[in-house]
Amino acid sequence: MKYVTNKMLEDLRIDSAQYVEWVENALSVKQKSLLPPKISIKQDGHRFFNVMPCIVPQLNIAGVKVVTRYPGREPSLKSELMLYSNDTGELSAILEADYITTWRTAAVAVHSIKLLARQDYTSIAFIGLGVIGQAALKVYIDTLNGRCVNIRLFNYKNRARDITAKYDCVKNVRFTIHDSYEEMIIGCDVIVSAVTYAETDFCDESLYKKGCLIVPIHTLGFQSCDLTFDRIFGDDEGHIKGFRYFDRFRSFNETADIILGKCQGRESGDERIIAYNIGIALHDMIFANELLKRL
C-alpha cells in the first residue's frame, strides 16, 4: 500500500491536455460505473464532512474520497482518497487529494467549454481567481491550440493584473480587466465562475447574449438562468436534481450523454447553455489511478 502526497503528484508535471483527456475518459465509462451521490454532513454551518464513493469495474478500481472543512485548521479545506483493487478489495494507495481536486475540477470546466461552446466564440470571462479559478485558466490557456481569444478578468485584489503579467508571452490571448460582473458578462460568449460566495445572481439573465455558455465551477450566481436558458447539462443528475428549479429546466442531460452519443451537445449557435459540474468521485478515481501509474 502506497501513501502519496500532493507534492509527489505535483512533481509529475502532468500536461494540461492530459488532464482534459482523463476527464473525457471518465465520462466515457460513467454509465457502467457505480456512483452514488456524495454524502454531505454539515455540523454547524462552518464544518462539513463529505464522502464520495465510486466503483469503476472496467478499470478494476474502487475508492472513496473524503473532503472536510474545519475553519480552525490550516488549511481549513482538505481531502484524502483511498483507492482499492475492485477484484480483491485490497487497498492500493492512500492519496492526499487536494492536488487531484484542483486539477480535475479545472480540467472538467475546460472540457465543458470544448464540448459546448460555440465553435466561433472569441470571448471568455473568468469570475473568481482563487486556486481553482487560476487552475482552470491555466488549463484553458495551455489547451487553446492557437485560438485567438479575449479573456475578461474581474478586478479583485490585484489578481487580474498579476495574471495578465504572468501570461504576457501568450500571443494569441488578449486580456481585459473589468470592475463589475455586468461588464464581464454583457456580450461574452463563455462565462466561467469559480466564485465561492455570492448573495445574489451576478446580473439579470437578460444580459447574457444568445449562444453563450455558462460554466459554474461553483454554482452560485446563476439561479435565474436555470429558468430561461435553453439547455442545461450536468455531471450527474443525482447532484443536480436537488436544485430549486430542476423540475422547471427546459432541457436537461448529463454531460456523459453527449460522449456516449445519447444526445447532441450544442444544436445551434443561438442556444444559451449551462454546464453544471458539481464534482463526481469518478473523475477523482480516474485521476488517482492514472497518476499512480506514473509514480
Image (spheres, grey):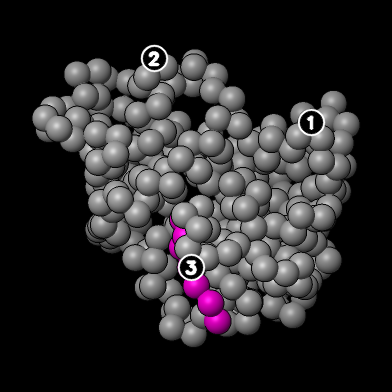
Q: Earlier in the sequence, mark 2 or mark 3?
A: 3
Q: Are the two marked residues, 2 and 1, in contact with CB atoms closer than 8 angstroms?
A: no
Quarter of the C terminus within the rendering? top left
How many numbered callouts? 3
Q: CA distance from mark 3 to mark 1?
A: 35 Å
Q: Which residues are magenta?
A: 250-257
The residue under the point 79% across, 31% down is 167
Does residue 190 appear in this view?
yes
Quarter of the N terminus within the rendering? top left
* Callout 2 secondary element: loop
Image quadrant of residue 118? Answer: bottom right
Q: Amino acid at mark 3?
A: Asn
Q: Is residue 133 above or below residue 183?
A: above
Residue 252 part of the magenta segment: yes
Q: Which residue is mark 2?
A: 295
Q: Position of residue 272 (x, y in %)?
A: 68, 71
Left or right: where 88 falls relative to 118: left
Mark 3 or 1, closer to the camera: 3
Left or right: where 199 falls relative to 214: left
Left or right: where 94 falls relative to 199: left
Q: Is residue 77 above or below residue 294?
A: below
Q: CA distance from mark 2 to mark 1?
A: 30 Å
Q: Which residue is mark 1?
A: 167
Binning the other alpha carbons within 10 Å of mark 1 as few (below 14), some (14 to 19) or many (20 upward) gives some
Does residue 199 appear in this view?
no
Label disc, if present, on residue 142 of the rendered structure: none
* Callout 1 secondary element: loop
Label disc, if present, on residue 253 of the rendered structure: 3
